[in-house]
Image (cartoon, rainbow, N blue to C red):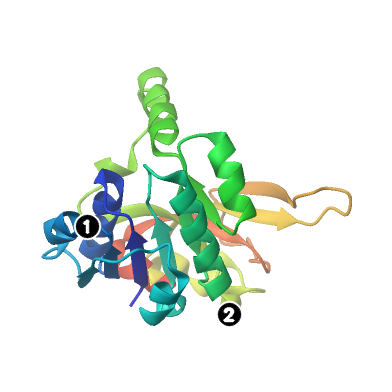
Amino acid sequence: MLKVAVLGLGRFGQAVARELNRQGAEVLAVDRNLNKVNEIIQDVDEAESFDATNANLLESRNIAKMDAVVVAIGSNFEASVLVTMHCHELGVPLVCAKALNEDQADVLRKVGADRVIKPEEDVGIHLARHLTHDSVVDFVELPDGFSLRTLKVPDDWVGQSVGELNVLNEHHLNIIQVMRFGNQEEAQQPSETKLPLPDGSLIFQEGDKMEVIGQDKHLIKFE
């Protein structure tokens, strides 16, 4: 089972924690405001009130054993930076942090955030696409229990084709596209090639990621 800690329980943090719980993840929700903890205590596996900027307290709650941590602190950027840094130093495999702008995003990446979310900007872009392209389907319009997600291709799939693995029938995943990353010696970041709607002949390579649609109960196994 996926284990996630959500640190900061404003509207964004509570929404993330409740949705993670709905999708079957084991959730630890944390905020130093006891009232916010009480608001969500019935909706997650565990909720605690403590100061997440204290690295010793994070370590005592076994944060390092989490599969991911969401740093959802929005009102105090200094606290967000400290918590992100502590989680990275403790060895959390995936640290996701909330940012209000690109300057904050840059700082959070430098102190250890693996993924940065800018909720207002992301939602604004998404809405604009909907208004200009009626055919764009939002993931929230999928049937209950289904999601569109980005997954790392499992190591034991490398060297095998989509057809050999029988991904749809055996694993119940509809592959929308495969993202392939190639190293460039002079580039600061690896180049990305998108392979949309791959047929059965596509052979997975090491480092591939894939965007898929499937039932949450099947998707959670890959995360």
Does any portion of residue 43 appear in the rendered image? yes
Percent x, y for residue 220? 35, 69
Marks 2 & 1, CB-CB < 8 Å contact: no
Quadrant of the image containing the N terminus: bottom left
Q: Residues within 10 Å of mark 1 (few under 14, many from 20)?
A: some
Residue tagged by mark 1? 18
For label 2, count other residues whose C-alpha is less than 10 Å away and answer few (under 14), some (14-19) or many (20+).
few
Quarter of the image where one finds residue 57: bottom left
Q: Nearer the viewer, residue 2 or 87?
A: 87
Gap in angstroms between the C-alphas marked 2 and 1: 32 Å
Note whether 179 is above or below 54 in the view shown: above
Picture coordinates of residue 70 (x, y %)?
40, 58
Residue 91 seen from this side: no
Q: Position of residue 202 (x, y in %)?
A: 63, 61
Res 129 → quadrant: top left
Q: Which residue is mark 2?
A: 156
Q: Residue at x 49, y 61 (%)?
A: 95
Q: Is residue 41 left or right of residue 128?
A: left
Query: Which residue is more in the foreground, 157 or 40?
Result: 40
Q: Is residue 147 left or right of residue 183?
A: left
Query: Under tag 2, what secondary structure?
Result: helix
Vertical order, 100 against 149 (above or below): above
- The residue under label 2 is which amino acid type? Asp
The C terminus sits in image quarter: bottom left
Question: Which of the pair 128/156 is nearer the observer?
Answer: 128
Residue at 40% in and 27% down? 124
Q: Is residue 46 left or right of residue 97?
A: left
